Amino acid sequence: MLFRPEAVGAAFHQIERGGDITYHGPGQLVVYPVFDLDTLGMGPAAFVAALEDTITLLLADYGLTATRLEGAPGIWLDATTAPRKICAVGLKISRGCTMHGIALNINTDLKYFNYIVPCGLPDKAVTSMQQELGRPLDMSEVRDAFLRKLQQVLPLSLT
């Protein structure tokens, strides 16, 4: 039977970015930064690493130890024992400019991930900060913390 996104209150959009399929919805911090990598003085791999470092530092402030997982893009908890993806990373870079970005699961309703194979990884789980910490978080607080961490990692000042 063909999956119909509208049957579960979702929509499907085909776009060009890294990764396979992902979910964006309420309770996520979705950040699609648009930067000229030449101006930042960095290449694509360094930019992706900077976004991943930003999320890792942010999660550490909440007591969550996050890492990369070899061969699986994104940010993971318990990568060596029971990997759970907490942040999707998928970018497209055209003429040195970044498009698309990250989706950090904060207070995300994780049931929607049951309808897809997130990022094309069928044997990996997905989690959220709320699930890991056992409480909902203030979205504005997490957003502001993300911006502070981004300014620590990238050579820029946000206004």
Image: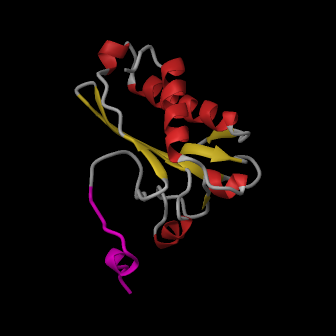
At horizontal 71% and vertical 52% (from top left) the residue drawn is 133
**Colouring mode (rainbow / by chain / secondary structure / one colour):** secondary structure
Looking at the image, residue 153 sits to the left or right of residue 19; the answer is right
Q: Is any atom of residue 114 visible in this view?
A: yes
| Location of residue 98 in the rendering, given as x and y in whole percent from the top left corner | 31, 31
Residue drawn at x 27%, y 58% as measured from the top left: 14
34, 26: nearer the viewer: 26
| Residue 9: percent from left, percent from top | 37, 74
Question: Which region shows up in magenta?
Answer: 1-14
Looking at the rendered structure, the number of numbered marks drawn on it comes to: 0
Q: Residue at x 73, y 39 (%)?
A: 63
Residue 71 visible in this rendered orientation of the protein: no
Where's the C terminus, which quadrant? top left
Task: Report if residue 23 lies within the magenta region.
Answer: no
Vertical relation: 9 (above or below) 99 = below
Q: Main secondary structure of the magenta part?
A: loop
